[in-house]
Amino acid sequence: MSRDSPLGLPGLPRDSEGPVFKEPWEAKAFAMALRLHERGVFTWNEWAEALAHEIGTARARGDADLGDTYYEHWLRTLEGMVARKGAASGDELDRYQHAWAQAAERTPHGSPIELRPADLTEPTVP
């Protein structure tokens, strides 16, 4: 592995000190995985196997795996692991995904996205 290609992924962003996150959500997904591991939700071996499986699945779908999609795989792995381990249901994950999308849609570009309690309420069916 060369210094120019950390983890063998040339598209993984880096600065002079090593790999960095492209977007704030990547750092948050990383931190959530660390925290869930610290709380015993999963072991690092479980995590590594699940992430490798997700990356393999993405490659089979045509992902060139240059590093630019690494944290998308990380996030999908995190969502799957949380659901499999019962830390949150698929419905809860969907609800939060919808809430964040709704909050992002109303937020002006460049402003912090704020999640409001109303974002988390189930939509009413007329």
Image: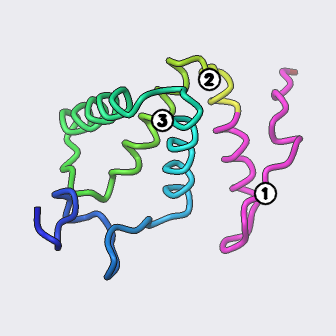
Tell which tag, 1 or 3, sits nearer the viewer: 3
Considering only order in the chain, which callout, 3 or 1, is on the residue closer to the N terminus?
A: 3
Magenta extent: 96-125
Dividing the picture into quadrants, the one containing residue 25 is bottom right
Could you tell me the amino acid type at mark 3? Leu
Residue 94 percent across, percent down from the top left: 63, 29
**Foreground: 98 or 7?**
7
Residue 54 percent across, percent down from the top left: 31, 33
> Residue 114 — which label?
1
> Residue 37 — which label?
none
The answer to whether residue 35 is left or right of residue 58 is right
Residue 40 shown in magenta: no
- Dot 3: what SS? helix
The answer to whether residue 71 is left or right of residue 26 is left
Dividing the picture into quadrants, the one containing residue 43 is top left
Quadrant containing the C terminus in the rendered view: top right
- Dot 1: what SS? loop
Considering only order in the chain, which callout, 3 or 2, is on the residue closer to the N terminus?
A: 3
Tell which tag, 1 or 2, sits nearer the viewer: 2
Residue 100 shown in magenta: yes
Q: Are the two marked residues, 1 and 3, in contact with CB atoms closer than 8 angstroms? A: no
Measured Cα–Cα span from mark 2 to mark 3: 11 Å
> Residue 78 — which label?
3
Q: Give the vertical position of 109 relative to 70 (above or below).
A: below
Label 2 CA crowd tier, 10 Å (few <14, some 14–19, many 20+): few
* Disc 2: which residue: 87
Could you tell me the amino acid type at mark 2? Ala
Dividing the picture into quadrants, the one containing residue 61 is top left
Residue 84 percent across, percent down from the top left: 50, 18
Label 1 CA crowd tier, 10 Å (few <14, some 14–19, many 20+): few
Colouring chosen for the image of the structure: rainbow
Q: Residue at x 18, y 50 (%)?
A: 64
